[in-house]
Amino acid sequence: MSGPGDFKPYDSGTTPRFQEIATFMRSQRHPISSEVDIALAGVPFDLGATYRLGARHGPAVTREASRLIRAVNPATKVAPFRLCNIADVGDAPTHPMKIEESIDLIQGFYEEIHAAGAWPLSVGGDHTVPLPILRAIAKDRPLGLFHVDAHADTFDDFMGTKINHATFVRRAVEENLIDPKRTIQVGLRGTRYGDDDIGYGNEVGITMVPMDEYEAMGREAFIKLALEVLGEEPCYLTVDIDGLDPRDCPGTGVPEPGGISMRDMQVIFRSMMGVNAVGGDICEVSPPHDPIGITFVNVANMMFEMACLMATNRSK
Amino acid sequence: MSGPGDFKPYDSGTTPRFQEIATFMRSQRHPISSEVDIALAGVPFDLGATYRLGARHGPAVTREASRLIRAVNPATKVAPFRLCNIADVGDAPTHPMKIEESIDLIQGFYEEIHAAGAWPLSVGGDHTVPLPILRAIAKDRPLGLFHVDAHADTFDDFMGTKINHATFVRRAVEENLIDPKRTIQVGLRGTRYGDDDIGYGNEVGITMVPMDEYEAMGREAFIKLALEVLGEEPCYLTVDIDGLDPRDCPGTGVPEPGGISMRDMQVIFRSMMGVNAVGGDICEVSPPHDPIGITFVNVANMMFEMACLMATNRSK
Amino acid sequence: MSGPGDFKPYDSGTTPRFQEIATFMRSQRHPISSEVDIALAGVPFDLGATYRLGARHGPAVTREASRLIRAVNPATKVAPFRLCNIADVGDAPTHPMKIEESIDLIQGFYEEIHAAGAWPLSVGGDHTVPLPILRAIAKDRPLGLFHVDAHADTFDDFMGTKINHATFVRRAVEENLIDPKRTIQVGLRGTRYGDDDIGYGNEVGITMVPMDEYEAMGREAFIKLALEVLGEEPCYLTVDIDGLDPRDCPGTGVPEPGGISMRDMQVIFRSMMGVNAVGGDICEVSPPHDPIGITFVNVANMMFEMACLMATNRSK
Amino acid sequence: MSGPGDFKPYDSGTTPRFQEIATFMRSQRHPISSEVDIALAGVPFDLGATYRLGARHGPAVTREASRLIRAVNPATKVAPFRLCNIADVGDAPTHPMKIEESIDLIQGFYEEIHAAGAWPLSVGGDHTVPLPILRAIAKDRPLGLFHVDAHADTFDDFMGTKINHATFVRRAVEENLIDPKRTIQVGLRGTRYGDDDIGYGNEVGITMVPMDEYEAMGREAFIKLALEVLGEEPCYLTVDIDGLDPRDCPGTGVPEPGGISMRDMQVIFRSMMGVNAVGGDICEVSPPHDPIGITFVNVANMMFEMACLMATNRSK
Amino acid sequence: MSGPGDFKPYDSGTTPRFQEIATFMRSQRHPISSEVDIALAGVPFDLGATYRLGARHGPAVTREASRLIRAVNPATKVAPFRLCNIADVGDAPTHPMKIEESIDLIQGFYEEIHAAGAWPLSVGGDHTVPLPILRAIAKDRPLGLFHVDAHADTFDDFMGTKINHATFVRRAVEENLIDPKRTIQVGLRGTRYGDDDIGYGNEVGITMVPMDEYEAMGREAFIKLALEVLGEEPCYLTVDIDGLDPRDCPGTGVPEPGGISMRDMQVIFRSMMGVNAVGGDICEVSPPHDPIGITFVNVANMMFEMACLMATNRSK
Amino acid sequence: MSGPGDFKPYDSGTTPRFQEIATFMRSQRHPISSEVDIALAGVPFDLGATYRLGARHGPAVTREASRLIRAVNPATKVAPFRLCNIADVGDAPTHPMKIEESIDLIQGFYEEIHAAGAWPLSVGGDHTVPLPILRAIAKDRPLGLFHVDAHADTFDDFMGTKINHATFVRRAVEENLIDPKRTIQVGLRGTRYGDDDIGYGNEVGITMVPMDEYEAMGREAFIKLALEVLGEEPCYLTVDIDGLDPRDCPGTGVPEPGGISMRDMQVIFRSMMGVNAVGGDICEVSPPHDPIGITFVNVANMMFEMACLMATNRSK
């Protein structure tokens, strides 16, 4: 409707970046439909967070920051918008005060995407968000999980609640939405509530790579390990941006020093081209906590890297 | 414990303002007890807000900003800390994700204050906060209400929830916690969802003073009206800072142009000295939305004005 | 396509404000067409500014801030979206480095709007923007002009250029796009380059109301004067936000102390309901210069007031 | 050396505002000499402040903000740079850690200015700064004083120190540098340390106009009173920017709600044209506390108003 | 008094982080006493700094940021609050304008801590602060020193003053408070005033590791070297945060590019577990210069690492 | 005129950093003359940029930030101001709205510098700026080019314009101002408009080192390569700060994740001492986009490194 072609994003070489209403990576706004291969979506929900909120505004600020993105990946030469139909399908519905109802609304939105045959690439929202997405797209068989985070998110509950941003991995394992054997977590490093914060992951067989181990093995070895863990079956990508170093992503609710660099994230995603990723998200993007906006520049670029990966996979 | 005397606040003429842990107006930290006449408290709760959150951090930032407050009111010469025992009793307990449970926890905290015979002066928190406070301190008889706000907060529900920052006045009337005949609202002016946003107030007999009327009648006439409405019976003071102009209080969730000036608020409170105020609060103070901090300077000074008013009343 | 109905904006009582891609006042995105009565548009152009740029990002930040707007005017009860079809038609095309070409592109966009029979309500962009708009919509007959500004914008040239943000009024008079006898300027007060900065206005018969006169006559008398000057013929509304006080609109390129208050602007627009306004704009909105965002809250509310005025006129 | 003429400031109509090294109001940098009529100077000193520092950076940020100033006063038509030789003579020397030594260094700098026959117009620095200036320029006879401030600055000592930003007026009276009978203070309103914070002023006969009185008498009556108090003898102007409302000057060390508006300050200075002002300063300008910069826009404009007043007097 | 137990900090798993008055790492507020093993203290003093001040507000902002800290170190599994009694003993007294008096007041406060048998862990304040601390706790025998800094702080004087943030190491050596043979400095790299800025260190035998050497030897070799230099005797830890890279700690008075990463600091402290540290501090934390707050997140985490190290040592 | 000696910069050990009008690295302000060896200059021009402007304010903010710079390089011991006469010659003239005219004005300014025999070291301005500089100083023979950037700047045109911040390298090659065989580019990594964004460089023989290659070869090998490419003939240094990582330089128009670290830039420049650099610039420094100021601290330090390199070369 408002763009130069059905699924062609605005070209910043002809339409200035500061022009037109911002969508994810300047893609076309499109309803959910079978024409869409990759559905870019926002999930403005942060009631699952425990400290500083604001991630409900994450999709809006990412759309704005992603005006910076151009067509072609400088390292891999992938041009995702040429490979398949990618569109911004808008935001999932949420309730501003009800957690469970919001989770159901979000799940319904992703069921619609899933039913249309599209693969979702989302910006949250706090890190409760992957749960309703996985409930929508992984109900038939568990997915592998590539999980970047400073925290394992494997608590059983937090202050008596089962659905929040510290529990989604456990819930997803319990509900058979992800396969712990094909799950790898990297960036783990926050100070801990108790001695066994990450005990559950060990118990069910998640491959956990805390920062010390990541640093010790090096980026290349980690990539190799991730590819092994994920295997060839379909998997899902989820990035809690506090997995990255606060230098790169200060605009988040629970920053933890000493994380993965944005440079490493770029190389990691570019090296995972063969992975069978059928969905992904970036969560805990909290605009009020980064007045400079470096966070959102990085989030937009990560979204592009994930789009390259998913588009390559989709077009195979 | 850590101060120069039991209920004497730090004197900024001998203890530099930037020294020591911040409490409300540099008062002593004290447990709730019968020695306390006025209990300064924080309510770090914002799950009742519908748009931009952050008021959970309101008490912390107000404590810090209130380092600016000195002992004596320059206009009325009231020195509240000389009139009675005023202490910072800390924050009400809350749950970071559960609304109803938080409301109950807050109510319990204020029941303790009420049982000790102290009068509460609080900083929220979103504007759901007065409800549990009133449930604790007004269960025996309805109070009058002096209410500064851009919105009437008289909705029956908001997206299906009954307890949120748009409904507390209606709930309080229904629960007989406030007497609508002794209730006056000023600052009303936000754009409206529908034609009858403020219909309920008319129905039950609340005296509503929208900005146009406030401006037309002038500050002095308004003060006279407020004194008439409130009468001599006990009343409660509540300030949603969006009642003030965004020039004075930009750091709030739902700013509305064209509000009451901080200067007017000072004069209004100073002119209400005879009012029988037995409690008060300032709500919707959202630190992430004011990087300059003018909001918190004003909130700290309003707290001082309300303390002057309550201390004068208490010491009668 | 993406909303609940053809021309119904998102209702913040059912779709949370933080949800969905921001459009002006949550209106529907719609192509320019004869169905549209009032076309909300952005003009991301700031090459005509002489000091601090950034107004090219004005439309984007105003769309985001206007999530705050609800359906009904609290003072006049006007609900503009009920009166006629109002839609966000996107941004005018511009060139990021060429002034004249951009001016032509903008004019072309507004000619399209004009040809469709819609009335434009725009957010700039620097204050060169009204010129191409007037060239598109006033070529048949000169319009009256209601002009809020700290500067008269009547220079003949600025450093040798004829088209810039200090000359648009002169150009518009010369091109017979506005009728100086039906033109009123208010807010004039910036320090001056020379003795005759505003001489041209006197010469051609523009009614100029510098701040001293505005203050001396008072708001009501000014409104009366404005209504007299504008008369009953079609007119255009243009607000350079530096006409307002920097307290209300710090986020602009050339702030000047001592301007009109946002409260006054609200009352002025609400009192001009009978005016035959067929278009309007708000210019010089520069996001990088206001990290708090009070500017954009006020701009969004002014846009709503102007929409109320134009919708009332359109539906007559 | 670097400008278009000896004492002609850069003309923003030919040299873009953003060009060249910033000086006060784009004036020429010039050594102290008998050619200079009005010496614009910075005093980067804030060791006399008691809470939040930063005013040492006040001169730098004011030079930058004063790029906005043009040649002619829009209300009075005064063009100060045409009336006499006005130049930026740089900053007074200071010591970064020694108060008394700094005070002596500053005094020496102003003695040089005074010896050259120039009148100083300065930007501080905290409000200790007027003391060494007055010691340099008023040693022969006491001056009248026009003093804008939220605080009377008449303490005898603060925590055992005699020279600080709360005592300069008392010291100046004791040293016969100012005549209390020809001294008027306006804007007084901060909460007080004790009951007699302003007792000294009453004792020695200073005319004090607290905010309540200012508001009650109105701007015009205040101007009349000020002209009466100041009389025809030489006087000095000093503005602690916390005398203004924090809406206009948030970037200061001790903001106090409810002060004088920048609009009033403009009108007051413009109405004091006949006053025999032989020097002036603006103090407590603290850049780290105003990321938006509205404070500095206002300070630059006040400097221009004071220059208009002094230049008119000088050229008589 | 205000917490769940005598020396148990608030548990963020039951008391939300945003609740209650902030203390260092949510520890209990406690008077100095023999029950306290490790005394967390603030030193709000910055009169020894030479450029940008603000470190007087360092303790307040660190208390707030340290709400993020949880109980257990993710790498070493150390849980410092379980190992010994750790409490927040408040701020050292200071004078807002007198350097020497402040130094004496600070020393007195730490003598009290030392007399009680507690080990101090402090947040400054500028980097003059370690001098009075060492005078209090090292008067009996010199301590080793682990010193992170961009500058050696070994000047003899700065502009004629002996006590300031550029001289503390030299004073401490002269006063036999630290043993230069057991002193190691790392992070040195700022541009220099002259050729021999760091000559004194060489002269007295301090082990200096400028950034080039640190990078060349690598983190592991540096840790080995540090352990050798410090040996088994008691030592003190001091971190001027400008030793870290400005990416990690922009909020400081004298940032210098190219410093140590926060990640390295974490690993270094975790690898120094055997060190006999009996005190430590983090200085030059200047809130006005970091509106995002990444600095304070890192400072809070460094405080936790130092607490782990000291608690392990204390509990041996 | 205003300093302690003809070409001696202010010594921060005797003149506090916060004192006096800021010039580049506290150098003396001096007219262009044959006495000047290295001319520090600003180029406040950003009309060649395509997205976010603001670099016109780059020179001002760099002057202010460079107050931090001291006399001696800590790694190389070079003290540039001792080696030759270095002065701040002010800003190049520009036109605020005309690109071509500005380019000509800038060229004229540098022709004057070149005619005087001085070597220019500049702060832009957008990255169109090197073109007029090279036209002035390289007309006699092509220079080598050391080019740090996220983008190759070798477009033929951008939206139909030939002179902008994406084309300067191509223009310079075409005009024989630089020798592509002696040109090396590093930091290249931004997403691309099309497949052949960097094709031109390959075609004409520019040595391009994208980030992946830079990381793969390592800093030392890159330095070796750069020295080989540049050879012994005169060369020019140009840094678009988006070549650095956004962690170090967020304040720029087009940030791209994953760039060169400031630490690497320091070491690279220090290792290029033998290079025959006869000029240099740092561009795309945009103050409105970095409210913290880490960008400008780094830019000031890079300027110092480049001055060390050029002064060493000049004094040979």
Image: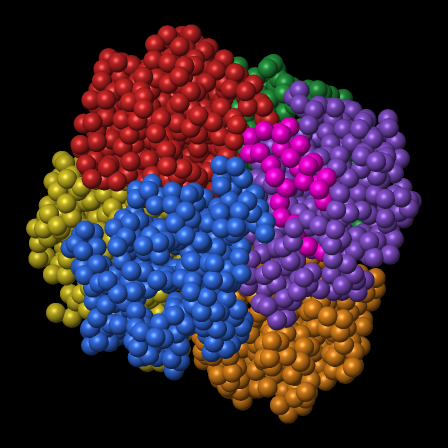
Chain colours: A orange, B blue, C yellow, D red, E purple, F green
Q: Is residue B91 left or right of residue E78?
A: left
Q: Is residue B81 left or right of residue A231?
A: left
Give the residue drawn at x 43%, y 42%: B70
F103 lies left or right of C39:
right
**In the image, farthest residue toward the bottom:** A140
Residue range in magenta is E86-114
Q: How many marks?
A: 0
Residue F204, magenta (yes or no): no
> Is residue E13 positioned above or below D200 on the image?
below
Decide which of C98, B248 is in the foreground and name it.
B248
- On the image, which quarter does residue B166 sit in? bottom left
The residue depicted at 72 percent of the width and 84 percent of the height is A179
Q: In which image quadrant can residue E188 be found? A: top right
Answer whether residue B101 is visible to the viewer in this image.
yes
Above or below F273: residue F32: above
Observer-nearest residue: B7 or E289?
A: B7
E112 part of magenta stretch: yes
* Quarter of the C terminus of chain E within the rendering: bottom right
Residue B235: x %, y % from top left: 30, 64
Q: Is residue D94 left or right of residue D127?
A: right
In the displayed structure, C33 sits above or below E64; it is below
Q: Which residue is drawn at the image coordinates 55% and 44% (left, top)?
A: B4
The residue shown at (47%, 58%) is B35
**Quadrant of the drawing holding the N terminus of chain E:** bottom right
Q: Which x, y percent locates residue E140?
A: 83, 36
Rendered image quadrant of residue A182: bottom right
Q: Nearer the viewer, residue B204 or A124?
A: B204
Tell me where residue C36 appears, x and y as whole percent.
26, 71
Q: Is any atom of residue F227 visible in this view? A: no
Q: Position of residue B20 (x, y in %)?
A: 57, 46
